[in-house]
Amino acid sequence: MEYPLGVLGGSGFYKMEGLEIEEERAVETPYGQPSDKLVLGKVEGQPVAFLARHGRAHQYNPTHVPYQANIWALKSIGVKWLVSISAVGSLKEEIVPLHVVLPDQLIDRTRSRPNSMFDPVAVHVGFADPYCPILSKALTDAAKGAGIATHEGGTYVCMEGPLFSTRAESNLYRSWGASIVGMTALPEAKFAREAEIAYAALCFATDYDCWHTEDVSVEMIIERLHTNAAHAAQAIRNLAAGFGKFATETSASHLALDTALLTQVEDYPRHTLDRVRLILKRVRPGI
């Protein structure tokens, strides 16, 4: 059985309310083990795969999340549409804590993470618009239907962490016109694109980052995560209920490798080819 809809749960979202669990599956990948077992089941009758990004015990900090293994595992069970749920800091007064942002752009401030599913070979996937507009629109409607104060579009600054921003960094990001700051969108969004999975995000503001009058603390964030989790679960139920309205569409993400392969597959190192064989099946059948 395939699971075309996947959900990556972030901080505070380690299990999914409303998911009728059918199986918890441990998946071995060429990139090592994912963050946790895949939790497979149905939401509103729609097959859904759930994975806790940090592990259900939050044992991986943002730098050490096994992003490659997570994306490969989801690809292996047929995920084509992937929703990221994450906690972020707000960089704009109008994005009030407990509001949700569906970003349409990314700025990469990470420095200690893998950069491609295909390393070391040359694969140049287009990434001008990192979030799938089809899925983002469906997710926006689902969030609004859940009664969540929703902001469509905006730029997500992904920093390395695990420490929070300095005030200078926070104000720098604001000067760029960014909307939110977080620690997990990258390289996750890049790897989803390389794997031809449409990707969109529900980013819940837990705080105003440190540019505002209050400093950020773990206690403050945890208190707000419980509310976020309930809102996110309702939004996913709405999305799953309306899955048929967009599931037959083809996202540009689903065709990302059509013009991206520079290194000839015959010249891939054997180890690399073994890792990406699953991802290349559509464009290079029979490899």
Image (tube, rainbow, N blue to C red):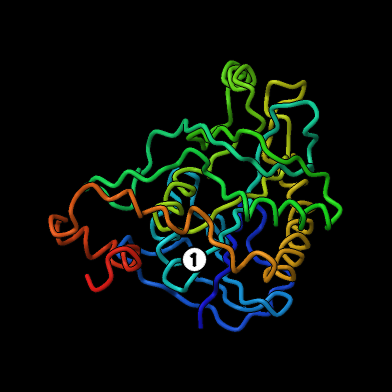
Q: Position of residue 109 (x, y in %)?
A: 47, 30
- Residue 97: which quarter of the image? top right
Q: Residue at x 55, y 71 (%)?
A: 4
Q: Indicate left or right for 69 with 151 as reference.
A: left
90 versus 222 height, above or below: above
Total numbered labels: 1
Q: Could you tell me residue 23's position as x and y percent?
A: 56, 82
Residue assigned mark 1: 36
Q: Residue furthest right?
A: 147
Q: Residue at x 19, y 49 (%)?
A: 263
State the image coordinates of residue 192 (x, y, percent, origin top left).
46, 54
Label 1 neighbour load within 10 Å: few <14, some 14-19, many 20+: many
Viewer-side residue, 247 vs 71 = 247
Position of 145 relative to 16 (above/below): above
Q: Nearer the viewer, residue 245 or 192?
A: 245
Q: Is residue 284 above or below residue 10?
A: below
Note whether 46 is above or below 52 in the view shown: below
Rendered residue at 41%/58% (across/down): 195
| Left or right for 21, reference 51 | right
Mark 1 falls on what kind of element? loop
Task: Pick the quarter of the image with the C terminus.
Answer: bottom left
**Along the line of sight, the residue nearer the viewer: 194 or 229:** 194
> Residue at the location (58% across, 31% down)?
164
Picture quadrant where residue 48 is located:
bottom right
Amino acid identity at mark 1:
Asp
Tell me residue 44's x, y (percent). 74, 76
Between 153 and 232, the residue placed more toward the observer is: 153
